[in-house]
Amino acid sequence: MKKSVRTALLVALLAAAGPSLFSQAPRPPASDVVILLDSSQSMFPYFEDAVDWIVGPLAKEWLRYGDRLHVLSFSSSATLEWSDLLETEADARSALARLYLLAPLGRRTDLLRSLSETREYLAGIPAGGGKYAIMVTDGRHDPEPGSPYAGLDAAATLAALEREASAIKAAGWTFLLVRVPFAGGTAGTGADGSGGQDGGGASAVGSGGASAAGSGAAAASGSGGAASDAPAPGAGTYFDDMADALGARVADFDAALAGSSALSPPRISWPAELGEVGRRFRLTVTVANDGDEARGYAITSFRLDGAETLARATRIEVPPRSEARVELSLVLPDSVAPGPARFTAELVPADGERLSPARGPLSLSYSPRFLDAVSASPVLLPGLLLVAAAILVALVIGFASRKKARVLSGARVADAVLDARSAAAAARHRARADAAVAAGAGADELARFAARTRGDGVPSIPAGTGGATGDAADELASYAARTRGDGVPPLESVRNPSDAAADFAEYAERTRGDGIPELTTEASATGSDNAGLFAEWAARARSEAGSLPPKPTPATAAAKPARRGPVAWETRIRKSDSVRVEFLVRDQNAAIGLRNIRTLAPGSRRSIGGGRSDFLVFLLPVPRHLADASWDGESLTLVPRRPEFFPDLDGVLEDCMDREVRLVTRRGRELFLRFSRYVPPIERLNKLLHCIEMPGPEEPGLLD
């Protein structure tokens, strides 16, 4: 096969893997790939196969479009053959064809000098992505007599070799060494047939280096003019020493197999057929690591026919001699039409890392989804977002309304129960009042009795004999017991003709606990007349006029409150009774409907303060949520949240119903708060209409 045909086929093989990947998507920084090819005569048996392997499998494994490719040949020194970016197929064709122009014609291999010149060349390459150097050689070192390294013995040669190799390794270059078998005496002899040049049979360093030098000296003395063909003192094979110093991966070249796969990068694979997918889909990639060290790869790009499809970067860690899987999120380009499609896929790690194969086929069938149409439409997507926002707002409002409705329904149930209780109490009060009217008012009877007996010497009622404050039943019972049979004139509706003791006893028993006002103590001294006592008591029983609590004396200097933390209080439940509470502030308008009237369930709390507090203070500006009113089913507790506004309280105020609490604003103004059980207006009206009625005997007989 002609070289031109072979070159065309190999270039086509490389280009077919990704013909358009070098112009459609942003790429990471260019990586540098340096190929070092030994062109000495000792490479002659394997040279053509080695070139075929370089431009074929090796290029496919390690070269990428966008890389900078450098081709150097070396024998007695290093020579730059080609260096440029691989941006187009023409660049690849030029670079790879250049290799076929090389021939193994170098008489000797100055490995040390070539390595030194290579180090200088690598140092001049600008920093970029990955740094890879691939050297194909038999590792033979036998410099020309004029070389600066010709006079070095084996030890000095080895030291210099390690120094140059360490400098290359320190610069961050990854070296791959391909060992070609040394040809020995089968090739590479000079024109005169002598064996002292690179093709001669000098022994390796470390085993026969000295003897090789000695035999060379003997040959020089015996042949006269052939002394220049004698091997150098440090001549030998330094392949293993160079590999160790460079930290390089090593593979043995096998001409029968056209090279070795030992230098292949970690292998990647993905399903070749994905089936039906949408615009967005996921692809599982497997990475196999055959090395002895763990490898990590940051995947920053995945291209389909050169178009970037990776939705977000990811990273994969691969243990040594194992494999790992990573799931990539991909987005098809907008140019892909629905239906079956076949792509050339390329996975690109960050920092110029190499994975093999660089490219591979990927087949799928694109079926548009609803979300694909939404994301592609400039009108539908905003419309759906607005609808979603409206639904969200509706859900929030519905949730809040449901919560409020639940609270209101609970409050209405409690109000209904309390109203029923109030109605029952009012009914009992009306029944008692009606019975009293029907049976006669005892107050009128006592008044008339007092008028009839004034000055008749009726025994007086001792002071303080009543058992309950505000109730004279016990005093009347005691008076009746003491005067029984003493000839006290009877009441008008006499039932016992002897005296009024029986009537008083019966009256006291019937009215016990009904809240009859207490007898006036000043008129009940021993020896006085009971007429004035009964008359005054009867007058007070008719009126039942209440009075406002006395006005507290305000503090002379109210200090500005200093902020303190909330008072700790744990809500508790003693009974299951609800209560309806009215919140009042002295001098604040109470005619605001039901704003400050709340129903408290057992264990519930309501806030007190300005703003949107449950119990509103608006007479003076105050912050919101200054305190909580907590109901436990039996009593109301005031829990300060901002204790600095309640200087008179050291903690919570339990059983605060109908008790005034002083609140001091930030400006030192005082407010007085009070809670009371809410009484509906109709119930207050009924009580007002019946305020002049007094319970009397249930049976007739005490009235005229």
Image (cartoon, rainbow, N blue to C red):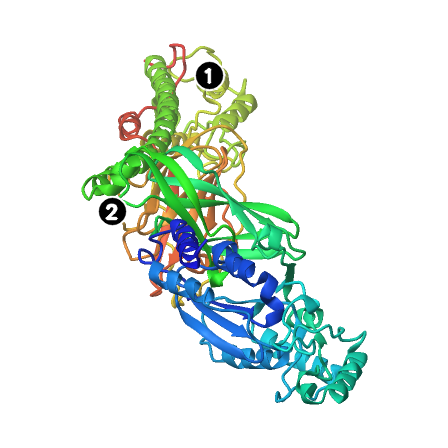
Q: Which mark is residue 97?
A: none
Which of disc 2 and disc 1 is earlier in sequence? Answer: 1
Q: Nearer the viewer, residue 23 or 94?
A: 94
Whether residue 698 is situated above or below residue 382 in the rendered picture? above
Q: Residue at x 65, y 57 (%)?
A: 293
* Label 2 environment density (alpha carbons within 10 Å; few <14, some 14–19, many ≥20): few
Q: Which image quadrant is residue 90 in?
A: bottom left
375 or 450, which lies in front?
375
Residue position marked by numbered label 1 in the rendering? 503
In the structure shown, which secondary structural element does the residue marked by tag 2 occupy? loop
Residue 88 visible, this orientation = no
Q: Nearer the viewer, mark 1 or mark 2?
A: 2
**Residue found at x 80% / y 81%:** 210
Residue 555 at x, y = what percent?
A: 39, 63
Q: Position of residue 681 (x, y in %)?
A: 27, 31
Residue 315 in view: yes
- 623 vs 111, left or right, is left
**Whether residue 514 is situated above or below residue 549 in the rendered picture:** above
Q: Amino acid at mark 2?
A: Asn
Q: Which residue is mark 2?
A: 589
Along the line of sight, which residue is nearer the eye, 496 or 683? 683
Q: Secondary structure at mark 1?
A: helix
Mark 1 to mark 2 CA distance (whole Å): 50 Å
The amino acid type, in three-letter code, at marker 1 is: Asp
Kindly indicate the quadrant of the structure image that contains residue 467: top right
